[in-house]
Amino acid sequence: MLRGRSLFVMIFLFVFVRVHSDSSNQIFNIKVSGTVVNPIYDSIRIADNDITLDSKGSFNQVIHVGYEGYHKLIHANEADIFLSKGMKLIINLDAKNFHQSLKFKGKGAEKNNFLNGEAGKFRKINYGQLLTLDTEAFLIEGTQIEDDFHRRLDFFIKKHPGCDSEFIKFQRAAITYRFADFFLFHSKVKELIAQLDQLECAHHLKKYLGKLNFNDETLLKSKVYVEFLDTYIKVRIEGDFRKDIGLKNADHFLLKGKLRFIKRFFTNQNVKNYLLYSTMGYFIDNYGITGMDDVIDAFFNNCENQGYKDKIKRLVESTRKKNKGVTTKIFKKGSDYALHAYIFKPQKIKKADKRPCIVFFHGGGWVLGDASWAFEYCRHFQKKGMVAISAQYRLTGRHNISALDCMADAKSAIRWIRDNSAELGIHPDKIVAAGWSAGGHIAASAAMIPKFDEEGEDLSVSSKPNALWLLFPGLNVAKDNWFIEQLKGKADPEACSPSYYIKKDLPPCIIFQGTKDKEVPYWTIEKFYKEMKEKGNMCVLHAFKDRPHLFFRNKEDNKRIIELSDEFFESLGYYTK
C-alpha cells in the first residue's frame, strides 16, 4: 500500500528496473567496503550485487558492475550512486537516518557525496506548492529551480577539473529529465500533452518540450532518462485511450497502449527496441504471463534486437517454470478477463478430506502483482497439511477497474472456494484469507466489509473467511492518497477501510507489522488491534521493531513470520497432527 508517488520513481512492490546494455559494455570490478549502523536487513545491495553484512554491519567486497553510470545503493532506503572504472569506495550509513548519514570516502567519493547532497536538495523542494500554479507560472518557476541545479553542477565541475565526461553528461541529463518527469504531473500540462495530436499546444509548453530529446540512445544507461520516457508514454497514451475505448477496456490495457505508442512515436530504432524490451520485461516481472500470449507475440514481431528477444524469451520460460506442476483453475470470468486460482494440495490428501485452506492475495498497491509471489508461502502451508491457494485479482495497472473491483474479487475467490470445497478437499468453515499490503487490505475487507460484492454472484454462499493472516495490511485507507487514487471516485474511502467495521464475532486474526513502516503506519495497526480486543475478538499482533514495509524480504524476519504463523494455526486446530 502506498501513500503517494515519489517525485521520480513509482515505488511499487517488486519493481525491477532494466538497464540498457550492449556488446560494447564490459563488466568491470569495483571494491566497496564500509559499515551500516543500525542495519535493518542482513545485506546491502549495490549495483545489483547483494553484499552480506557481518555481525557488526560491516562489508568488504569486490562487486561486478555492468556499465559506467548511475546505479542503486539499497538498504533501508535507496540512493543513486555513480560508478566507473578504477573506483574504490568506502560507504558508511545509519539505516535509521539513511540519506543524512550516507557518506562516501575513497576514489570516486567526491562525485557521490555531491550526488547525495543534490538528492537532499531535490527532496526539500515544495512540489505541492509548485503544482498549484497555473501552467505558465509552473513551467517558469520550475525551470528556474532546474537552472539552480545546473549552476551547482557547473560549480562542482569547476572545482574538480578532472571530473570525467561521463559523469558530467549523465548528471546534466539527470537534472533535465528529473524536472521534465516532474513537469508531467501538473494537471494542465498532462492534459495538454495527452491531446498533442488534437490540440495546438501552448507556446510555453511547446518550447519546453522542444529542448528535450526523446531519441538519445546514449542516455539509455540513465535510469532518470528512461523513467522520464516511461512517464511521457503514460501521459501520451491517455489520448489514445480516449479515442479507442476498446483499448482502454482490454486486458493488459496499459501494456498494449504503451507498446502501440512506442512503435509509433520513437524514431531511433535502438531507443524503440529498448523501450519495447523494458516495457515487456516490466509487465512480465510484475504481472506474470497469464493472458499475454498475443502481446508477447507482438513484442517478438516488432523488436529488432536479438539480445532483447532472447532475454524476454528466457524470462517467459522461467515464469512458465514457476507455474509448472501447480493445479490451476479459473474461479471468475468476465468479458475481458479470467482470474485463476493456483492450488497447492497436500501430497496425502484424500478425496473425502476436509482440510483447512489458506488463500493468498499478493501485494502491489492494487496496481500490480502476480499470484506466483505467494507460492513460497503456499508450499509451506501445503506441507503443514492445508490446501493453499494463491488467487489472482484484477489490478488497476492491468484492467480498467478501480480498487473496489480488487475487493470484490477477493470475496469472489473465497465464495468460489467455499462453493467448491468438496471438490477441493477443503473444510468450508476453515478458510483463511491471507495477504500482504494491498492484498492484506482486500483479505480483511472480505472478512469485515458487508458490501462491494460482485454483481450477480450467489450471495447465499458466504464470502467471509474464518480466519485472517495479515502482513503489513492496509486496514485504514480513509486518508491514503494512493488508495484514493486507485478508488477512482467509486466510493467513500472510509467505507473501504476495515478499521471502520470492527464489531463482535469477527474471525481470529494474526497481524505482522513493522514499527517503521512508512506506507502502513504502525499506529493504524496498533489501533485496529486494540479495538479488536476491546470487542472481544481474537487478534494477535506481532510488532517487528524498526522494520519498514516489505520487511519479509529479510530472511530472518520471514523465518520468524513462518514460526509465529505455525503457532497461530496450531492454536486454531488447523494443522493435522
Image (cartoon, rainbow, N blue to C red):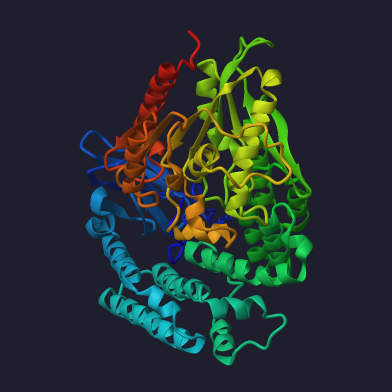
- Where is residue 322 shown, x and y percent of the image? 62, 32
Left or right: 246, with 390 as reference point: right
- Where is residue 84 shown, x and y percent of the image? 39, 58
In the orientation shown, which residue stands out farthest toward the bottom? 203
Q: Quadrant of residue 60?
A: top left
Instruction: Give the camera-side residue of 149 and 215.
Output: 149
* Residue 141 shows up from this direction: yes
In the orientation shown, which residue stands out farthest toward the top? 577
Residue 340 versus residue 182 in the image, above or below: above
The tally of labels here is: 0
Instruction: Give the camera-side residue of 404 and 436.
Output: 404
- Where is residue 577 shown, x and y percent of the image? 48, 7
* Residue 43 shows up from this direction: no
Query: Residue shown at 48%/40% (left/top)?
Result: 440
Query: Residue shown at 43%/57% (left/top)?
Result: 3
Left or right: 64, with 417 as reference point: left
Query: Residue shown at 57%/82% (left/top)?
Result: 209
Residue 125 versus residue 456 in the image, above or below: below
Q: Quadrant of residue 458?
A: top right
- Where is residue 272 shown, x and y percent of the image? 67, 64
Query: Residue shown at 56%/55% (left/top)?
Result: 21
Residue 32 versus residue 210 in the image, above or below: above
Q: Quadrant of residue 571?
A: top left
